[in-house]
Image (spheres, rainbow, N blue to C red):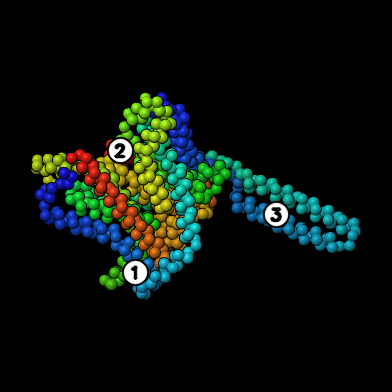
Amino acid sequence: MSHVSPAIRGRASQTVLNLYLAFFFLYMFMPLILMVLAGFNDFSPPSITVWKGLTFRWFGELATDTRMWTGLLNSIVIASLVIVIALPLGLAGAFLVTRLQSRFNGLIYGVMVSPLLTPGIILGISTLVFWRDLGVSGGLFTAAMAQATFIASYAMLMFMARLQRQDVTLEEAAMDLGATHARAFRRITIPFLRPTILTAGVIAFLQSFENYNTTIFSIGGSHTLVTEIGSRMRFGLSPSINVIGMIFIVLTIVFAAIYVHFREREKRRAAAVLR
Amino acid sequence: MTSLVRSFGPSLTAAILLLTGFWIVGMIVAPQLIMVEKSFWYLDRGGDAGALTVRIDGLYNAVDLLGFDKLDAEALEPSAERDLKLDDIGRQVAATKAEIAELETREIKPRKVYSFTNYTLISAAHFAIFVKTILAALAVTLIAFIVCYPIAYTVAKLAPPGKAAIIMLGLIVPYAINELLRIFSWLMILNTNGVVNTLLAFMGLEPVAFLESGSGVFIAMVYAYVLFMVFPIYNTVETLDVAQIEAARDLGAPMWKIHWRVILPHAKPGIAVGAIMTFMLSVGSYSVPYIMTRGIAAPWFTQLIYNRFFESNNWNAGAAYAFTLLITCTLFIFLLMRIFRVGIKDIAR
């Protein structure tokens, strides 16, 4: 049984808790709903208190905004670079930590997860400083490197979780039967990791695409979709930003629903196996 | 090392070591070290750099003026006097150009001086901003814990599975929506003609200047980072065996005592992770103050860092500011690991 039986709780505390949840979700969703509504308001700057009638013209304005489109393209370029850089690094890190038997394991692990505990702006600025000293000025490449520093840590944690469930005897059996290390790696380890490689790729892409704080400090004169949205929020505010918000929210809900669906299915499967 | 070679063979081991080496040295350690090193020196241009630039500009003007004199002299009838004048102008041009060259090398190749100047130069005003940023981040962290603990506990232990899944979806959606958009949604609520001020006016109350006073930054910060506390606490509470809660109850413990003696101790690593993430995100947030101050309220520490680097173009001072922030976060992490008695392996999972 995974939850406390209702008999334990009093009815009054149940009511209080339900009220609290209702307030919390109102707090979480009200601002987002207002933002979406303002995207349909025929009034700029975006507002919900001054209502001038329903319009769809902000959609049109967004569609013809070339800076947004180049930003989107740059975001995709950076995210692809991040996948290519961060996944191999994370995988190598996970192999090192799970298989290396050394008293430095804790230290190595600590250093490899430290980017997750470092403020994003520090990762961004230190990457920019480092590459400028090597003669590479800020741009899409430095932004991708800065993001990959911490996204590789996420990938490593995901690979580690998977590797801890790996049956090492399979690899050993393959090699006893005459397979080379490379062959055992290719035919046993990689297929075992494939689902995680896929998930880590998706997570890396989303993390990169959404990133603001690290990117703004490392990208130099270029821009991504998200940094462009950021500067529009400060200068030249227009309801087309609300339309972007709407698009992001719809996509997020779809992705989150898919994620929760799979998670529940996995849970049920695990429960079925136990039974 | 032998354990690695046994698992992967020599060539794969080499690849693994190369990749991790590049990551650790080239992406994590070296950039930080170089930034720290930069924070400990500055460029001495021999007095005021601005005055030097003005002097060089003046000399260039002098060269241009001499050029006009030369044109005037060339227009004269050929004579000894004209040759003398041209000679004289030529000498003056050469002398001025030599002086420019000398000053310019001083301007281009200033002396590198190691010192703590970049740190000691942080003014009282900037230090106050630093303290304000830390206090705000601590407050965000505390609020996030108070708000999120009941929710995490409900999803993990109280709600029946179907309801828990729906609450979970309700948490994941706002958590996953882009940070900038979540911040932006508060702009319309808090600005001069925003939702809150319209409601206040409706009730006959004075409007509140949320954005100008900087309180808007704090409100949006709580909203933007509160959910980073939910999931770590949920993950640890979920692993608690319900039998422990029921046993405590059967033994007559009141609900608050069950939380204090059973659930909270079990959730410690999750609380530590949540607190570290929330604090780190708030103290290091550039997006929230960037959007919510709109240049009308006082800046936050992250904005000072940005300005040092990209506006006043003083990378050495910027590095010192950035390193100060990094040290603050590191100290906070070690402090929490001490208080909650958890290790790095518990924190990053």
| Amino acid on which disc 1 is placed | Ile
For the residue labelled by badge 3, is the local secondary structure a helix, a strand or a loop? helix
Residue B324, quarter of the rendered image: top left
Residue A34, quarter of the rendered image: bottom left
- Callout 3 crowding tier (Cα within 10 Å): few <14, some 14–19, many ≥20: some
Q: CA distance from mark 3 to mark 2?
A: 65 Å
Q: Nearer the viewer, mark 3 or mark 2?
A: 2
Q: CA distance from mark 3 to mark 1?
A: 59 Å
Q: In the rendered image, which residue does mark 1 sit on? A: A48
Q: Is residue A273 above or below residue B284?
A: above
Q: Are marks 3 and 1 on the same chain?
A: no
Chain under label 2? B
Q: In the rendered image, which residue does mark 3 sit on? A: B59
Q: Residue at x 87, y 58 (%)?
A: B82
Q: CA distance from mark 2 to mark 1?
A: 45 Å
CB of mark 3 within 8 Å of CB of mark 1? no
Q: Which residue, as the protein is rendered here, is positioned at the far right?
A: B79
Work out whether residue B176 can be spotted: yes
The C terminus of chain B lies in quadrant: top left
Q: In the rendered image, which residue does mark 2 sit on? A: B346
